[in-house]
Amino acid sequence: MHEWALAEAVVSTALKAAEKERLQEITKIKIVMGELQQIDAEIFASALKEVILPQKETLKNAKIEIKAEKAVFKCRVCQHIWTFAEATNQLNEEESESIHFIPEISHCYLRCPQCKSSDFEVIKGRGIWVDSIEGEQ
Amino acid sequence: MDPRLEIIDERLKEIKRVIAVTGGKGGIGKSLVASTLALILSKLNNYRVGLLDLDFSGPSTDLILGIEGIYPKEEKGIIPPEIYGIRFMSVIYYAQDNPTPLRGIDVSNAIIELLAITRWGRLDFLIVDMPPGIGDATLDTIRLMKKTEFLTLTTPLKVAMGTVKKMLAMLKELNLPIIGIIENMRTAKSPSIEGQISGLDVPYLGTIDFDENLESSIGDRSKLLETAFAQRLREILLRAPQFKLEVNSGA
């Protein structure tokens, strides 16, 4: 349940944003869930619910929107662009789990399908990101 | 917004002191000092000690301490496994023996991820083994682990001294706490660096002689603790008031 740690991070971000913007209530949190981190959406959503529970005042009516984002890589050497879906056959279960904990570990196990370089950029879909927080003052 | 940045303080809040073992150059003994320091502290006064290896491209604290076959537990985050009385965290759990060819932005992202998901619990000391220089890991340590105190290492070599002076200048400019400087690998022919650092206004904690027997103790913590290197480090640790230990030297 490492998803729990990320859910706590999201709630902490929302609460700090509320404090900074002097929001009485948060009405919506939009979260982007990057594919590379392979977060279990159900576990993440239920962890989020549980972490939110004690924050009744600020977050009780918050609508949570989670949008999945496909992971896309770009090779820094040959400029080739490819997707995580195309790369997953390069990974065994253990490697996949290591990337789940630290997405940058993908540089240990993934290679550019065209030139075999490990020097690539994750241009989209790395991990959890808070896209926006909406609320009322 | 990167949510991970907002949880790091929370993850570190039960850690009393964070000590980053740092220096300008590679090969000056940072990982050895960090690992041995963690071992020595874990045997003093029931201190709870963690060791974090932030040298992603050349992690070696696991090799020095002979750590293998352990893995963090997943429980609302990741819990570093305890070995030899040290809660140990390193990228090796995930990279294993593979090279970790990370650019700056990736190093930074991996550090943020590790700090955001690792649950250290209560610690008296978290020792951080830093990669050489003032690159991403140092900048992120300064940015993200705000209670960090810096233990600086150098050798008597001119190139090591030249770079450590720059590092100290940066830390001082930022007004960050510097425990002091240890001179490592001193030989009979080495020039004294004490004069060279006197103008820097940084506590000079002592010297550790070059220890020819150290290499054969790598991977064996009991042998490591018996080396002249480890005994001298222990002496410095217990004597220098800058470490602010709540122990008596007989502990």
Image: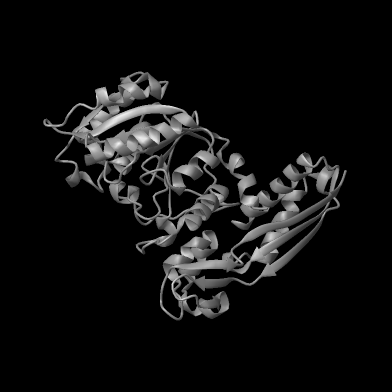
Residue B50 x, y percent position in the rendering: 44, 40
In the rendered image, residue B152, in percent from the top left (x then y), is placed at 35, 33
**Residue found at the far right of this picture:** A137
Left or right of A127 in this view: B152: left
Numbered circles on residues, count: 0
The residue drawn where x is 43% and y is 31% is B47
Residue A122 in view: yes
Q: Position of residue B184 (x, y in %)?
A: 24, 34
Q: Is residue B202 visible?
A: no
In which quadrant of the rendered view does residue B249 lie?
top left
The image quadrant of residue B129 is top left
Where B97 falls versus B249 (above or below)?
A: below
The residue drawn where x is 75% and y is 45% is A17
**Image location of residue A91, percent across then percent down:** 47, 74
Q: Is B237 situated above or below A30?
A: above
Front residue of this view, candidates B133 and B17: B133
Picture layout, residue B139 above or below residue B100 = above
What residue do we see at 33% from left, 36% from top?
Answer: B164
